[in-house]
Amino acid sequence: LRRSEGDGSPPPSEFRAIYTGLQFEHSAFLKTDHKQEIFNLGFETRTSAPLNFSPREGTYFQFAPFVGYQFGRRLTNNLENDDPNGQKPNKWISRPFFGFNWTFVPGNVNGGSFVTFKGQYINRMFLSGDPMFNEDDVVIADNLKPLGFLETSLVFNVFGNEVLQPYIKFRTGRDAPKFVLTQNSFEIGFTTTFDFKDI
């Protein structure tokens, strides 16, 4: 096990494992649901400790546990009349969270890979209470219980580059901003990447 100051990028093939040091991320966020009934505006800070493994040349695995905190406010909320207790839902956001990311690239000796397996698990805790919804978009609780959400995806490198990459994605759990329960949801699509460094 070796320690290095880096950005979490894959280690050289001669290293079996490498610890890249703590990473600190700070970001603002604006999230809404597909009906634009709830808008969440806030700030997120996250600390992660990536561990990179290279069991053999061309193969790469990263496991990155993290902890963080979200703070913000709901800018609009027209759902006061849907609250089961007859009260206005809390509009402040205060969410400590923890979880982990992972990326697995089963490469070959030439450094290429046909598929990448990656995902994230996040568990949010609620200090101020967030309105939680059912599948019919009705508020069912002002939630204070921890809620977990898992998302994984298989990304296929069928064209030998990152310009067009088909993927299969799986989701389960409750995610912001409405925390509607998602049970074994699958999604098929593609991602594109453009590089403007030579323009």
Image: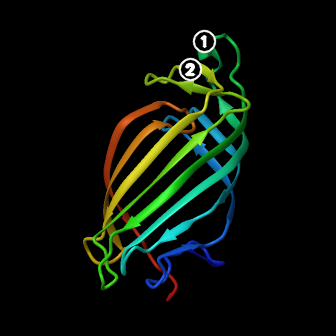
* Residue 107 vertical placement versus 102 (above, below): below
Q: In terms of depth relative to the viewer, which is nearer, 99 or 16?
A: 16
Image quadrant in which you'd find residue 122 = top right
* Residue 51 vertical placement versus 185 (above, below): below
Image point (40%, 73%), residue name: 55
Mark 2–mark 1 distance (CA, rounded to whole Å)? 7 Å
Crowding at dot 2, Cα within 10 Å, few <14 / some 14-19 / many 20+, comes out as: many
Image-based side of 105 in relation to 120, left or right: left
Which residue lies most toward the bottom here? Answer: 198
Image point (49%, 89%), residue name: 198
Q: In terms of depth relative to the viewer, which is nearer, 178 or 4?
A: 4
User: Which mark is on residue 103?
Assistant: none
**How far from the left and from the top, in percent, is residue 129?**
69, 27
Dot 2: what SS? strand
Q: What is the total number of numbered labels drawn onto the structure image?
A: 2
**How far from the left and from the top, in percent, is residue 191?**
37, 63
Crowding at dot 1, Cα within 10 Å, few <14 / some 14-19 / many 20+, comes out as: some
Going by the numbered disc 2, the residue's amino acid type is Val
**How far from the left and from the top, in percent, is residue 185?**
35, 39
Dot 1: what SS? loop
Residue at the disc numbered 2: 139
Residue at the disc numbered 1: 84
Image point (59%, 44%), residue name: 31
Going by the numbered disc 1, the residue's amino acid type is Pro
Q: In terms of depth relative to the viewer, which is nearer, 110 or 32?
A: 110
Image point (48%, 23%), residue name: 134
Image-based side of 187 in relation to 80, left or right: left
* Residue 189 vertical placement versus 123 (above, below): below
Q: Can residue 36 be seen in this view?
A: no
Q: Decide: marks 2, 1 in contact (CB < 8 A)?
A: yes
